[in-house]
Amino acid sequence: MMIVLSGAIGAGKSSLATILSEHLGTEAFYEQVDNNPVLPLFYKDPKKYAFLLQIYFLNKRFESIKKAMVQDNNVLDRSIYEDSLFFHMNADMGRATPQEVKVYDELLANMMQELPYAAAKKAPDLLVHLDISYDTMLHRIEKRGRSYEQPEQDPSLPEYYQQLLARYDGWYDDYDYSPKMKIDGDKYDFVENPEDRQKVLDLIDEQLRARGTLK
Ligand SMILES: Nc1ncnc2c1ncn2[C@@H]1O[C@H](COP(=O)(O)OP(=O)(O)OP(=O)(O)O)[C@@H](O)[C@H]1O
Ligand SMILES: Nc1nc(=O)c2ncn([C@H]3C[C@H](O)[C@@H](CO)O3)c2[nH]1
């Protein structure tokens, strides 16, 4: 069983990946963040580092999907499809050249052809999208405390975060690579509240059962 989690910055993907993989007895594969040497550079100088960061993420994402595919059962913290959302938004903000966008899009398409699920041999069984409001996003970013993500470091970050959330709405509506479901990340505190955690797990189990993925 392959489950993919999606959602904006601080939506709770890593937290839910841990909870869900423990619940299902599967393995969690996390996005490389704290050991990512390019991410702090990007936040300091997005124009200079947007393309390099994107290549870094694409490479790591591909590596982690390849590892995940070896196991039959896994939970992936963020999908490869969202990387492109980030990059195109940054490009529209003037942080990547049209040539960089072309190279990235072609490389992504090439790499996707190598993924079994891209070839429709094995799509994810379910995409679980964590939907959060702007206020929740800021609160969670503060709570987690990565210094380079804090709005005090850069007054343009609130606008960046708002744009990202707006793009995610359209992205989820258009996503059609696999079955999908949304979880209200404002409503359910699955990190601190055991009752909320159980409700979220029940909602996901229900979707997996309806599709015969979970008996
Ligand atoms: N549903 C929730 N209720 C309360 N707190 C939450 C919830 N989800 C996440 N958090 C808290 O918000 C912070 C961010 O969560 P997490 O790192 O899981 O998000 P993420 O989606 O993986 O973020 P990113 O994409 O930036 O890596 C953490 O401090 C976590 O404890
Ligand atoms: N520019 C850019 N492109 C991506 O593909 C991408 N994927 C994640 N991130 C940033 C968001 C969080 O700060 C942090 C953790 O998700 O990494 C990205 N940033």
Image (cartoon, grey):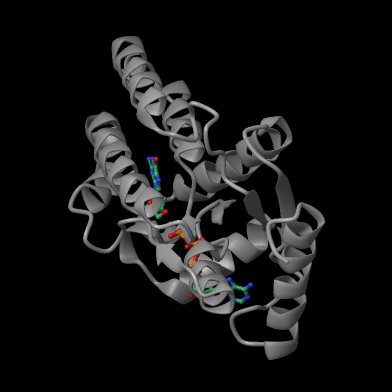
Q: Could you tell whether 22 is left or right of 34 in the image?
A: right
At which x and y percent is residue 18?
48, 73
Task: Name the foreground residue: 4 vs 55.
Answer: 4
Q: Which of the 4 image quarters holds residue 104?
A: top left
Q: Is residue 152 above or below residue 159?
A: below
Viewer can see residue 94: no
At which x and y percent is residue 102?
35, 12
Please report the residue visible at 67 percent of the width from the left and 87 percent of the height from the top: 193
Q: Could you tell whether 129 is left or right of 164 in the image?
A: right
Q: Could you tell whether 113 is left or right of 127 in the image?
A: left
Q: Which of the 4 image quarters holds residue 12?
A: bottom right
At which x and y percent is residue 121?
52, 32
At which x and y percent is residue 64?
32, 50
Please report the residue visible at 72 percent of the width from the left and 81 percent of the height from the top: 198
Q: Is residue 194 above or below residue 139?
A: below
Please report the residue visible at 77 percent of the width from the left and 77 percent of the height from the top: 199
Q: Could you tell whether 158 is left or right of 58 in the image?
A: right
Please report the residue visible at 54 percent of the width from the left and 43 percent of the height from the top: 159
- Quarter containing the C terminus: bottom right
